[in-house]
Image (tube, rainbow, N blue to C red):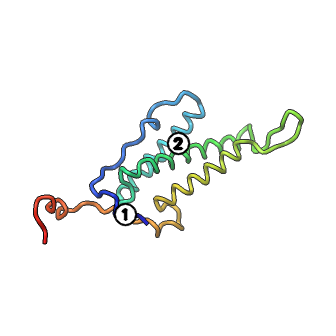
Amino acid sequence: QRGDGVAAAQKRPACPRRFINKQKTEDGEAVRLVAKRTWDRLAPALYEAGLLADTYRETLECLCDSFGRYTLACAKCDGDEGMVIGTDKGNLVQSPWVAIRNKMYDQVYKAAACFGLTPADVSGVRAVEKPTAEDDKKKFFKTG
């Protein structure tokens, strides 16, 4: 569970620049598009639920990036490259994209758990407390 160390007056984090800027390769662009859509879908909902603060920006960025890479690896496994490839000697081996897909799945699952995005982890997160008008007054008036 989250501790009290998160500043309540934080703003919603902006979309990472690398999700906005066009990438140089076709695979990089495919990852960017999925990551940007994922950011645009999750960030507002998490922020409104009090589960996203500016200090969590990097974790959400990793989640979105890993999901983009997971999606790319799934497409490669489902496409012409397949899940099994032949070596120079004619042996059939697992495609490297299968290992990448599995690794990205693990990363997505772990990052999603941080935000309570999995059914098992919903109870383990706590919303960031948003400042109230009373909190603003405490800056100027002595309490007690």
Q: In screen coordinates, is 64 left or right of 56?
A: right
Q: Which residue is mark 2?
A: 34
In what quadrant of the picture does the C terminus appear?
Answer: bottom left
What residue is drawn where x is 89% and y is 35%? 89
Residue 77 sits in quarter: top right
Q: CA distance from mark 2 to mark 1?
A: 26 Å
Q: Position of residue 26 (x, y in %)?
A: 59, 31
Residue 92 sits in quarter: top right
Amino acid type, mark 2 = Val
Mark 2 crowd level (few <14, some 14–19, many ≥20, 10 Å Cα): many
Amino acid type, mark 1 = Ala
Q: Which residue is mark 1?
A: 127
Residue 69 image label: none
| Residue 39, above or below 7 | above
Q: Position of residue 45 (x, y in %)?
A: 40, 55
Label whose residue precedes the other's in the sequence (2 or 1): 2
What residue is drawn where x is 53% and y is 42%? 34
What residue is drawn where x is 54% and y is 27%? 24
Closer to the camera, 139 or 96? 139
Q: Position of residue 67 (x, y in %)?
A: 55, 47
In what quadrant of the picture does the N terminus appear?
Answer: bottom left
| Residue 143, above or below 61 | below
Q: In screen coordinates, is 92 left or right of 8?
A: right
Residue 86 sits in quarter: top right
Q: Nearer the viewer, mark 2 or mark 1?
A: 1
Q: The residue tagged with tag 1: helix, strand or loop?
A: loop
